[in-house]
Image (cartoon, rainbow, N blue to C red):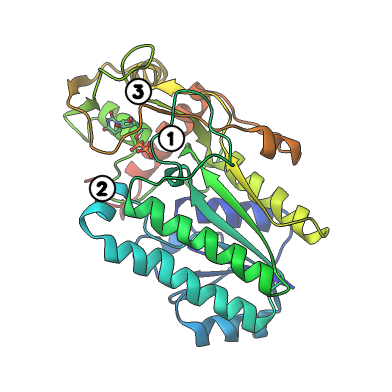
Amino acid sequence: MSVLVTGGAGYIGSHMVLNLADAGETVIVLDNLTTGFEWLIDHRVKLVTGNVSDTQLVEKLIAEHDVEAVIHFAGSIVVPESVENPLKYYKNNTASTRDLIEACVNGGVKHFIFSSTAAVYGMVGLEPVAEDVLLNPASPYGKSKLMSEWMLADVAAAHPMTYGVLRYFNVAGADPEMRSGQSTAGATHLIKVAVQTALGHRAKMSVFGDDYPTPDGTCVRDYIHVSDLVSAHALLLDHLRKGGESTTMNCGYGRGFSVDEVVRTVKAVTGIDFIVEHGPRRPGDPASIVAGADRIKALGWQPKYDNLEGIVEMAYKWEKYLDTRNDRPSIL
Ligand code: UDP
């Protein structure tokens, strides 16, 4: 039996592959390599290059490799891009997920784990957000993921499949052994941008808004280490394999840091003082979004890297490692 990981050549997917391969699982990666990198994939697993919407291909893979579970990461993830090009998101996220689920139902896949996002919540208050609040995604990205969540719930009610949905908060850091890390070109995420600025790849960076109703006026986010995130998937898979019920849960530590705190931490960890401007707000940013983490903790999740300095340190180390590669992915 094997586990099919879609998007396994991407940032989070490649860490999932490491987690599964380290645990001795047989893993097949399906990735179209548009944003992923073949060299990020652990050599112990098989890569199939293709689209998750290619139902024929997926059904063939399921049958050939006796796929018991699918962990679905493949998709598009840039919020502002989804505002400019919503149809790309409804195609790459919603429609593709629909086709993938169909192939899984046809192939008799038992468990489906789906990477969703805190963007399904939209604007929330300053308190940690629980899974059962009213969902009101503010972007096509958030909506495209929420529609997939709904499809999964309907399909699991109609077919013998159980599912787990994880709503990710702000994922950062890199594999502690430096076997993988965030490598995508044109990164927009705060910690990645800050370490690239520390390394001189960017002349300066900007803090987007400092008049939010938060303690220091900058936005607050729940930054979670990528290895802890993937260990939550492994735990969820174990839960489903043991006959556990389908479930949807936040994946974050339940505490937040402001943009200014993150920038200060990057300066302290790297020992480099780079130029930071305070600019206008970025459209669509909630003031604060922190995970209510009761559900995931009740599942038995024990994160190992809940430490902002450590997360930044690993992101920084990975960025320096990329600099040593001849085929370094472009920075901007
Ligand atoms: N941010 C910033 N400057 C940057 C990138 C991000 O001030 O160059 C802020 C952004 O406005 C948000 C927080 O950092 O308040 C986290 O943004 P990111 O894009 O990392 O993740 P998001 O929370 O949007 O998923």
Going by the numbered disc 2, the residue's amino acid type is: Pro
Q: Quadrant of the N terminus?
A: bottom right
Q: Which residue is mark 2?
A: 80
Q: Is residue 240 left or right of residue 320?
A: right
Query: First in sequence: mark 3 or mark 1?
Result: 3
Indicate the position of residue 125 as horizontal and vertical percent values: 44, 26
Going by the numbered disc 3, the residue's amino acid type is: Val
Q: Is residue 159 left or right of residue 129?
A: right
Indicate the position of residue 313 as horizontal and vertical percent values: 46, 27
Q: Is mark 3 within 8 Å of ligand 1?
A: yes
In the image, 17 versus 188, the foreground residue is: 188
In the image, 256 versus 146, the foreground residue is: 146
Mark nearest the camera among 3 and 1 is 3
Mark nearest the camera among 2 and 3 is 2
Residue at (40, 18) in percent of width and height = 265
Q: The residue tagged with tag 1: helix, strand or loop?
A: helix
Ligand 1, seen in the image, is in the quarter at top left
Going by the numbered disc 1, the residue's amino acid type is: Ala
Give neighbour class at mark 2: few <14, some 14-19, many 20+ (Cα, 10 Å).
some
Residue at (45, 56) in percent of width and height = 145
Q: Residue furthest right?
A: 242
Q: Which residue is mark 1?
A: 315
Seen in the picture, residue 12 relative to 67 is either above or below; the reply is: above
Seen in the picture, residue 215 relative to 203 is either above or below; the reply is: above
Query: First in sequence: mark 2 or mark 1?
Result: 2
Residue at (50, 52) in percent of width and height = 116
Seen in the picture, residue 271 relative to 118 is either above or below; the reply is: above
Q: Which residue is mark 3?
A: 259
